[in-house]
Image (tube, rainbow, N blue to C red):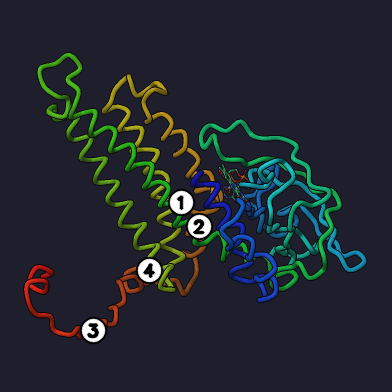
Amino acid sequence: MALTLFAVTLGLAPVVHAGTAAQQRAHLTRFLIPAGAPLAAFALSEPGGSANFDAPPPAEGVRTTAVRDAGDWVITGAKKWVSNSGGWDGTGPDLMCIVARTDPAAAASTALSVLLIPGPVTGLTVTGTPDTIGHRAHSTPTITLTDVRVPEGNVIGDVGGGLRIVGSAFGPAAAQVGVFGLALMRAAFDHALRFARANRRGGPVPIIDYQAVGYALASAKTRIEAARSLTWRACHALDTGSPAGHELALHAKVFGSETAVAVITDLMQVVGVDSYAHEQPLGRLLQDALALPLFGGSNLGLRRRQLHAMLREPGYDEDATVSGTPAAPRPRATPQRRPARTGRRAASSR
Ligand SMILES: Cc1cc2nc3c(=O)[nH]c(=O)nc-3n(C[C@H](O)[C@H](O)[C@H](O)COP(=O)(O)OP(=O)(O)OC[C@H]3O[C@@H](n4cnc5c(N)ncnc54)[C@H](O)[C@@H]3O)c2cc1C
């Protein structure tokens, strides 16, 4: 459920960041009124792999195409793993921002565009649903688009300017994956700590009294606190527009996701064999955590590659993450002078 809601904000991000006022009015309004359950999607990933969506020719990169025809864009291709892309009933989401190739030969920096597909739309077909390991209530179907027509004005930003929009939508999403990792670790830790305090497993003392168990819990908590601090810093940097935001978000994504998998696995050892059944929550939490290094831009295929590219930049400032993130001092609110109160009521209110 968290992913379904998260994917709505991801799907709307291109309109929020780069849409015109008219596009925002036309496409955001239905998501702002307290009625219905509209779904949005941001469709980048494709069958056959998407880590190299920005690779220059002769790499294929994005294979879905959008071609101008009689005042419309005609979109053809397939997308896979896109959250909410089937909508609630297989007819597609209420709004899909789709990444398509508008220039067949150019490099990704000028060949990709983001187009708005309001649903339901003719030509969108759900062709499959991956039987996922975790996030079982979340829908990431495979869809094909056959001659899907949208008006020419449905390009967000400039034609050919899609790469920048992908970055502005998926960049902050990296920090949010750190938040998902943290949430899963918290739930797992809460369960393992209660279990270790409450269970003797046939021995004379609760298992938390054994040093091995206590140290494993302590080590898990250390890593949770480290992930929490990093994620907070990343979110704060993004919220305050710090230049360090992008790098910190990448660290929060990579560290938070991989730490979640490791910590939950270790906490299963704390609980022991009973954690290996679905009657306990740890297996399910691990199944969900396993997605985190793989999605939102996989850690190996995309996010570490982005960090690597930063480090190779001649102007890279390794200290930007140090100076860029402390909380800016908030202007002190001028205390509102209240009329002096007298008597018993004033005394008790203090
Ligand atoms: C639950 C869930 C929800 C998702 N929601 C969305 C969504 O809403 N929208 C969307 O567009 N996508 C979504 N995805 C897809 C997700 O974002 C993936 O990150 C994306 O498809 C790319 O996967 P990948 O990096 O494994 O790519 P692939 O191209 O399949 O790469 C496979 C592996 O190859 C290696 N590799 C490939 N190229 C390189 C390279 N250049 N350098 C180094 N290693 C490389 C890496 O090990 C990589 O992990 C979702 C996925 C899941 C599981």
- CA distance separating discs 3 and 1: 40 Å
Q: Which of marks 4 and 2 is nearer the N terminus?
A: 2
Mark 1, secondary structure of its residue: helix
Q: Which amino acid type is shown beneath numbered disc 1?
A: Val
User: Which residue is identified by label 2?
Assistant: 173
Q: Which of marks 4 and 2 is in front?
A: 2
Residue for badge 3: 336
Task: Give the label on residue 318, or none.
Answer: 4
Identity of the residue drawn at 53% across and 31% down: 133
Q: Earlier in the sequence, mark 1 or mark 4?
A: 1
Q: How far apart are marks 2 and 1 (CA)?
A: 6 Å
Q: Is mark 4 on a helix, strand or loop?
A: loop
Question: Local crowd at mark 2 within 10 Å, few (<14), some, or many (≥20)?
Answer: many
Residue 177, disc: 1
Q: Position of residue 119 (x, y in %)?
A: 74, 54
* Category of crowding for the residue at label 3, using alpha-carbon neighbours closer than 10 angstroms: few (below 14), some (14–19), many (at least 20): few
Which mark is in front, 1 or 4? 1
